Amino acid sequence: MAPDSGLTELGWQQAHLVADWLSRSFTVDALVSSALVCARQTAEVIGQQLGLAVEIMSGFDETHLPYWNEFPTTPDDPLAWWDQPWRPDPEHAPLYTRFRQELRQAMAELLCRHLGQTVVVVSHGGTIGTIVRSLLGGHQTPIFTENGGVTHLVWQEGRWRLVSHNERAHLGDPALPAQLPWAEAEPARTIVEHFQRVAASSALAQTMPDEEQERALIAFVAPQATDRVLDVGAGAGAAALALAAHTTHVTAVDIAPAMLERAESARSLRGITNVDIRWADATSLPYPPASFDLILCRNLCCYIADLAQLFAELRRVIRPTGRLVIEGIVASEDPVKRATHQALAIQHDPAIVRLYSESEIEHPLREAGFRIERAEVHDAPTTLEEWLALSLLAEAERAGLREMVRASIEEDAAGLCIQRNRDGIIAFTFRRLQLLARLNVAAGHSQIASEEAS
């Protein structure tokens, strides 16, 4: 893993479990994080749960200097250091001494700002171990901290008290993640579980846009160099990473930890530094009002049960002069054909909540205070077997879906222009919407006025 890489799928789950436990166990006054990506991502999740902003503080980062090689060893005498603590110094332990100096400065700043408060510091195993060693003595002793482990220190009556170290009971049984925010809520659970399977399958690579599709997306979105971008429902991060070269900063959010891991892996592999990968529910974003110049919703609407709620939330976080881009498959305006198409789509992808027609997207968008500047519908032809190759269905389930599609050929029951050619190949055409919208000026001013009033 790269030195400053982000969370894995398991890491995102552990971050939520830690956040849930902290919210139930403590009244936290401040939330501090190291500047490294995995710590910041964890802290963001905790901050969402606790309702606290994340304070990035230098000095709490893990060092990659091999300072542990400077610790003394006594191979033949396990009790050699009993009551004789080793004291590191610049001559004999220069790396460890430097690391401790930087960490002491960070602790001094932390205590200056937050003495007397309950503070959560999201940091790293080596950093935590060094804090414990430095406060309690015994520098020759390595201290191990697992991912998601919690160390509880209290300054009380003029001394430090170690309440616990590497506490992990809050992580529970990984097979029973009851505290995870999507564990019991539908459709979130179905979406997370589906994309967990997608992320582990070959279908993921097949769904990624190629270079031509990326160029077409960039041309339509027309990003500006100064844009701060939010990619909602970012999936494996293809669009967010494509936009990164054209904008100031991109925040990519998704509800599925497995997809966030893929997005972070791609970001790290390509060395892109102006993209943040974050967990978030699209209908409850952890960002202040008017945060983004450009919001992208690609292939998201079909996973949202209430578009009015989604669009109201997007309106909240978009700047008055910002742009919203929506892209995805739309169904027929005919309700019967739309229902048939939806039945096929849900059979293919059980995480889909419903399909919308173009007008069913545009109406709540206008109601939310947006005006549509540009809307284009493009044909996206495919064959039945190409479409089935993108699914995670077993062969028996694919056979059933084939029969459903064949039954839809007559009278174009799904509105997909399904046809069988001379070779017996069944082909059909999806309709993909690309839409660009801006806030109505009046709506934007109304939003700002209400925020200032509150």
Image (tube, rainbow, N blue to C red):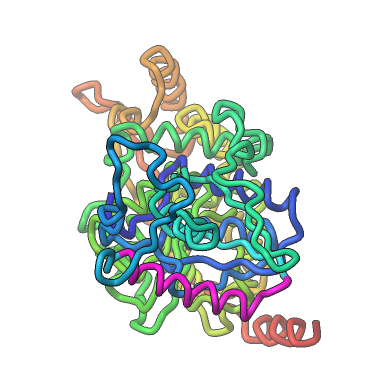
Q: Nearer the viewer, residue 407 or 235?
A: 235
Q: Nearer the viewer, residue 64 or 132?
A: 132
Whole-percent x, y for residue 109 in the image:
55, 79
Among the 4 quarters of the image, the one containing residue 271: bottom left
Residue 85, can we see it?
A: yes
Question: At 58% from the left edge and 83% from the top edge, which residue is drawn?
Answer: 320
Whole-percent x, y for residue 444 in the image:
65, 83
Q: Nearer the viewer, residue 172 or 353?
A: 172
* Magenta residue check for 106: yes
* Magenta residue check for 194: no
Quadrant in which the C terminus appears: bottom right
Q: Which residues are magenta?
A: 96-116
Among the 4 quarters of the image, the one containing residue 49: bottom right
Q: How many marks?
A: 0
Residue 435, can we see it?
A: no
Whole-percent x, y for residue 134 in the image:
48, 62
Q: Main secondary structure of the magenta part?
A: helix
Question: At 56% from the left edge and 73% from the top edge, which residue is drawn?
Answer: 55
Q: Is residue 408 above or below residue 70?
A: above
Q: Residue furthest right?
A: 454
